[in-house]
Amino acid sequence: MKLAHSFTLACLALSVNSEKLAIPEVDTVVGKVIDRLGDYVKYHGNDSVAGNISSHDGMASVLPRQATPYWYEAIAHQGISAFGTSGYTVYRNVKDYGAKGDGIADDTAAINAAISAGGRCGQGCSSSTTTPAVVYFPAGTYLISSSIVDYYYTQLIGNPNSLPVLKATSSFSGFGLIDGDPYYTQNLNWGSTNVFFRQVRNFVFDLTNIPAATQATGIHWPTAQATSLQNIVFEMSAASGTQHTGLFVESGSAGFMTDITFNGGIYGASIGNQQFTMRNLIFNNCVTAISQLWSWGWLYQGISINNCQKGIDISAGGSSALTVGSIILIDSSITNTPVGIITAHTSTSSPATAGTLMLENVVLTNVPTAVQLTGGSTVLAGTTGTTTIAAWGDGHEYIPNGPNSFEGPFAANTRPAALLSGSNYYTRSKPQYGTLPSSSFRSVRSGGATGNGVTDDTTALQAVIDAATAAGQVTFFDAGTYKVTRTLFIPAGAKLVGETYSIIMSSGSFFNNMDSPQAVVRVGHAGDSGQVEWSDMIVSTQGAQAGAILIEWNLATSGTPSGMWDVHTRIGGFAGSDLQVAQCPTTPGSSSINTACIGSYMSMHVTKSATGLYMENCWLWSADHDIDSSSNTQITVYSGRGLFIESTAGTFWLVGTGAEHHTLYQYQLVNTQNIFMGFVQTETPYYQPNPSAPAPFTVSSSLNDPDFATSCAGQSGNCANAWGLRIVNSKNILVYGAGLYSFFDNYKTTCSNGGGSENCQNNIFSLEGSNSNVNAYCLSTVGTTNMITENGATLALYADNVSVYPDTISLFRS
């Protein structure tokens, strides 16, 4: 049976906006963690007074850190909030607010002042896009005595050339050196599934002043889509009995992390969330490297665990009430660790497919037990030498028919050489251009663009991009909202960097003809070759934009791939979009369509000529609610299509991406090849089937749109709903984790409640035509009767694959 839902522990916010989807068994596990922390899970305020710390904190003799200059510190800061208060300050240097960074003065109050200044979205605020901030930390050691509270829509950025150190005093109090979502009451301040658009990067978090026996956490990070942690080191006590934890996550609905090192501690990371992608994490001398509290699905890629007592513990809840849905570990290593992975999954454990574990290309060195069952019995023997686990897993498999229960080795995926660096999948972290001087950056505001969301900035933006690219400079988009009324072109060789998610926003009649769709941002022309790097920006629309293709990617890249990092599409639901509650309220009782709320034609189109694109932590979101509404009120905005890839040559990496609430599909791959996808996440529009797909759009055969009239002929139920993932005539598609979710039927969630009929929609993952080497590890669905269909025939039913809340298939092969 599916797990029943109830409104229970508020600290576990498994919410879909205003809807709380609570899982009692998970609540219990997380509740025990919270209880164990006791008084530690309390907010201790911004009441620290700057001053000198006594020498027993070991900091009196700290010398100033020698820093290599970083361009972002030196560049002119002229970003604005287009729809916020006039004169609002976006960029804040903590030293301008009194922080010393000398390792002696208590900098807590100064840092919190830098974050909170300007009437920002803090305690009691549900969410806001009008008070964005970048809080910058020059090199130094910043002594703190209580938590630094990270506000909504904030980027905390340190100097990547000389990482600033946030060092706790011995008497530190608070839930994390950085508290990303405080418990001002029994509830988190922000609903963790609605905490979007923020980053923390380039820091050392030093807990070593705190006595080893005292519970302490580096970062408390309940979070959701379009968030990230990058380039971080946690320093914790490795003494016997240590109670330090580097990272604590108890709830949320997605996220991404990369390039993080955990040294010491009882737990490197103690984490639970719906789904996550974590890449390039290093754990040294932890008692347990990763304690997995719960999950629906999780991808660990490029993990290195060294000299720990335990590697990854996924046994939470025990065999009778498992709370971890599925875990994938690839391209990783475990060294000098007695037990690699601890599980509670057995042939009789419950739920049936919970605790799924998939391993591929995992190197063990002196790991006597690779996988151990709670209680101590060996599931998979390890080695006192060195060995590589090519592929091993457990759960349900469909090859392509099933379900068949399995536990043991299986044939590893056939990896296309085009996707590899050595034997591992290619990866690349977001460039921060640390070696470039500030003169290598050209500001769009200095070049005449306003970013005020009102003035047409098309001409000014194009001139700056062209000039910067020709000169070998990086185009810097100062914080702001840049209105464009014609297509903005990004040529080969361009590098674009935003500031707290600078926004390119289409507006006007040019983008509002559904019969003549136009690109808002076009990267290269068909036939162009070269490389583009693009990071930290959003592409959006304003008002009715029925013909807007937000991003069109034509560029063919050979050699080092082009890249998009933290580049998102956002259609509606924010101040200035004219697609908010006032314009686009939900209408569950009416079948009429408000054409003024048709916000886009497509989020992103990768065309036939394109190849060689690496996308990391990119979220294509058609808003289901108004972020700037005090109650996160649901809205109805229509967006035609999510991510469409029809590249003939293929070769794409989708790392930690998501696409949500588009009408026809979220991901569509047609006549393409060589695509890595991990972990991908989707949601079906909340309004469907009122109207059913494709309304309000029409089917375009030139875009290989799904024809619901044909595919749904003769079917009852909710057939004409958006596809989560549709693959047509393609090959070498490697899916390392997918969460395809359908929570609503015309804004009601009874169709996805645990123990119910799982009939929000009939189908969600479609294979059509002739496909080859299509592989999916840990495919999870919610609210969907048929988990996989091939040319209209059902391959897998939800009822056969029940997991913790979603339904999960460990291994699928076409």
Image: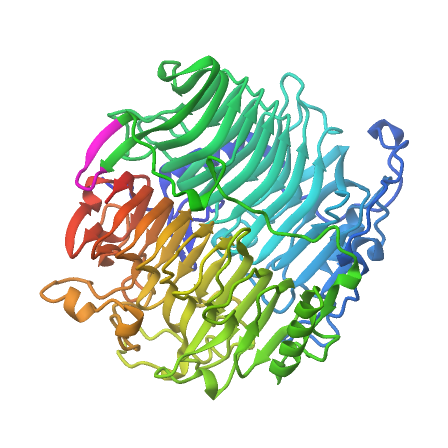
Residue 296: percent from left, percent from top? 38, 42
Q: Give, as a single range, the part of the protein colored magenta.
A: 398-406
Residue 380 drawn in magenta: no
Residue 618 in sight: yes
Residue at 40% x, 83% y: name it: 596
Residue 796 drawn above or below residue 741? above
In this picture, is 813 found above or below 238?
Answer: below
Which residue occupies 17% across, 38% down? Answer: 402
- Image position of 58 with respect to 685: above or below: above
Identified at 57% across, 50% down, the residue is 228
Of residues 209 and 47, the one nearer the viewer is 209
Quadrant in which the N terminus is drawn: top left
Residue 397 placement (x, y as % from top left): 24, 36
Residue with the most extreme bottom position: 509
Q: Position of residue 199 (x, y in %)?
A: 61, 52
Image quarter of residue 474: bottom right
Q: Is residue 402 magenta?
A: yes
Q: Quadrant of residue 490?
A: bottom right
Depth check: 298 or 735 in front? 735
Find the residue positioned furthest to the left.
714
Does 704 sit left or right of 47 as displayed? left
Q: Is residue 84 visible?
A: no
Q: Nearer the viewer, residue 92 or 525?
A: 525
Please, is residue 696 above or below residue 79 in the view? below
